């Protein structure tokens, strides 16, 4: 089963701990510090569109792109409830991104980049994002660090609400430099529970290597931040944010 197939319909209910507003505030603080006031934003790997909707409500013109048809179905359903300035969604893989016109900023959040398990796809994504940005544009994204992904090896986690029960197990493969998540999802169907299984995989990217690839793609300047704070990442940081600037 492909990633985010059955999980798509349960995703929002199982991720209520994600503070999208705080993440958006942090990204806007990075942009405003540079004097940037973008009008158009691409939410790359937008998932169910929660960040896309928040950005639209804050006045941006938003395009969301994702590879999962099921996640985009959820995103479109939610966007249909917004009477004004709804985001527009397209199905595109990151490494083959192609926009009809460039945007002022690209966001790629919640470790979506880690899902590119082939480093060549990551480098291609950087090149595509660079071309999708207007001069002066910004590419803001985050990753799960190698420190975090290595530490997940052997861990088991539970997430649940009234409608869904999710058990996921992590295993880090050193040879592949990937963390695999085996996810058992149980969803309530009347008096019964329906079970499905998905396998997710995240590549443990070296932040210094990503920094070099962003420069290789043409970005003039690259910055790294700790998890939703302006300071530089700590050695044991679990999540790192990048800001890459196009001249």
Image: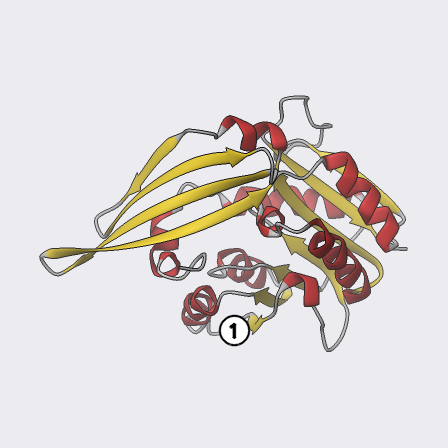
Q: Residue at x 73, y 78 (%)?
A: 100
What percent of the width, then of the height, locates residue 102? 77, 70
Where disc 1 sits, the SS reads loop
Residue at left offset 51%, top offset 34%: 172
Seen at 55% across and 65% down, the residue is 67
Name the residue rendered at 49%, 65% in the picture.
68
- From where the camera sits, is residue 219 visible? no
Q: Position of residue 144 (x, y in %)?
A: 59, 38
- 170 relative position to 136: left or right: left
Tell me the quarter of the picture where residue 120 sits: bottom right
Comparing 201 with 42, the one in front is 201
Percent coordinates x, y for residue 167 in the rendering: 31, 41
Image coordinates of residue 19 in percent, x first then y, are: 48, 43
Residue where numbered disc 1 is placed: 84
Quadrant of image for the N terminus: bottom left
Quarter of the image containing the C terminus?
bottom right
């Amino acid at each position: 089963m492909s990633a985010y197939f059955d999980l798509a319909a349960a995703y929002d209910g199982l991720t209520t701990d994600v503070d999208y507003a705080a993440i958006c505030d942090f990204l806007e603080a990075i942009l405003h510090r540079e004097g940037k006031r973008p009008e158009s934003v691409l939410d790359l790997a937008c998932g169910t569109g929660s960040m896309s909707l928040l950005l639209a409500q804050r006045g941006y013109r938003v395009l969301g792109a994702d590879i999962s048809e099921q996640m985009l179905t959820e995103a479109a359903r939610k966007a249909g409830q917004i009477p004004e300035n709804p985001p527009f969604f397209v199905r595109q893989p990151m490494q083959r991104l192609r926009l009809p016109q460039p945007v002022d900023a690209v966001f790629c959040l919640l470790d979506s980049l880690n899902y590119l398990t082939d480093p060549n796809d990551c480098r291609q994504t950087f090149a595509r994002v660079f071309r999708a940005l207007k001069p002066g544009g910004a590419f803001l994204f985050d990753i799960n660090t190698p420190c975090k992904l290595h530490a997940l090896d052997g861990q088991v986690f539970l997430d649940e609400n009234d409608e869904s029960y999710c058990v996921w197990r992590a295993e880090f493969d050193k040879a592949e430099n990937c963390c695999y998540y085996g996810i058992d999802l149980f969803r309530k169907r009347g008096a019964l529970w329906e079970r499905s299984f998905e396998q997710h995989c995240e590549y443990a990217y070296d932040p210094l290597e990503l920094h070099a690839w962003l420069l290789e793609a043409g970005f003039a300047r690259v910055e790294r931040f700790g998890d939703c704070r302006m300071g530089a990442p700590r050695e044991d940081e679990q999540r790192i944010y990048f800001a890459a600037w196009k001249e």
